[in-house]
């Protein structure tokens, strides 16, 4: 090391300054500039996070309303499970509906099933173009008292695998004795699958 120092001191002044300039430029491009770039990147990321937090704070009222609406929906209708796959969710859905009918003494219900696309909307947009979302609907037709019909609808609404009770039709049952009515209740489950499958 001492030999190089001696050689450096023995060089003409212009050459020594030239070598120092080259070393300085190399240090700048190899160490200082990458460090400055990294600091700038961190600064930009911090600015982005700050903007997000400020936006979050300014939307506090809107978010509070959304949270209250979600809480109210959970109290009224119970939890709703997220999309299930076709193989398991359909079985879970039918088992849950059968259980509701059994617990409310509806033994002879007529059932019709069909699948249909859920259609465009927020959920479809969030799931992406590679995912197909379908509604599995089950029309349940039965005769019962108005109280029993209301109990069936309420219990279906509280069942997590039932995404929606989309239609309820009740009419007087002229051919029956007592207070029985004729009801058609449509319950839905939502399933997802990758496009190109099935």
Image (cartoon, grey):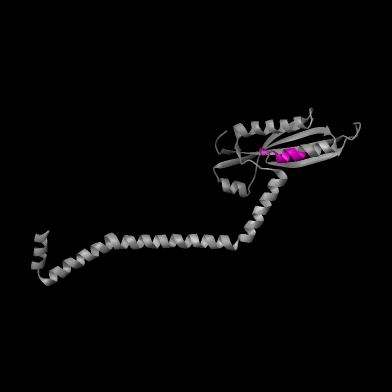
Residue 28 x %, y %: 27, 64
Q: Residue 181's x, y, as percent?
A: 86, 36
Image side of residue 95 versus residue 17, left or right? right
Residue 148 position (above or below residue 76): above
Report if residue 159 lies within the magenta region. Answer: yes
Depth check, front residue: 86 or 44? 44
When asked about the image quadrant of residue 118, the answer is top right
The image quarter containing residue 96 is top right
Judged left or right of residue 19, residue 69 is: right
Q: Residue 172: percent from the left, percent from the top?
A: 88, 38
What residue sits 63% from the left and 34% below the top?
Answer: 89
Residue 124 lies, in percent from the top left, at 60, 46
Return the residue nearer the eye: 33 or 197: 33
Residue 179 included in the magenta stretch of the image: no
* Towards the viewer: 133 or 51: 51
Q: Which residues are magenta?
A: 153-161
Which residue shows up at 64% across the image and 45% down it? 119
Image quarter hosting the N terminus = bottom left
């Amino acid at each position: 090391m001492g030999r190089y120092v001696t050689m450096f001191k023995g060089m003409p002044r212009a050459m020594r300054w030239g070598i120092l300039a080259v070393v300085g430029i190399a240090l700048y491009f190899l160490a200082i500039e990458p460090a400055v770039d990294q600091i700038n990147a961190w600064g930009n990321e911090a600015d982005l996070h700050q903007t997000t937090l400020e936006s979050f704070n300014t939307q506090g009222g809107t978010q509070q309303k959304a949270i209250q609406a979600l809480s109210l929906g959970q109290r009224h209708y119970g939890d709703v499970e997220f999309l299930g796959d076709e193989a398991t969710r359909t079985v879970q859905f039918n088992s849950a509906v059968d259980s509701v009918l059994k617990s409310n003494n509806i033994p002879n219900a007529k059932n019709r099933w069909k699948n249909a696309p859920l259609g465009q909307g927020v959920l479809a947009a969030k799931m992406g173009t590679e995912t197909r979302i379908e509604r599995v609907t089950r029309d349940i037709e039965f005769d019962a008292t108005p109280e029993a019909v209301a109990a069936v609808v309420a219990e279906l609404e509280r069942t997590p695998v039932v995404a929606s009770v989309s239609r309820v039709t009740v009419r007087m049952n002229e051919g029956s004795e007592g207070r029985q009515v004729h009801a058609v209740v449509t319950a839905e489950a939502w399933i997802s699958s990758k496009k190109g499958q099935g």
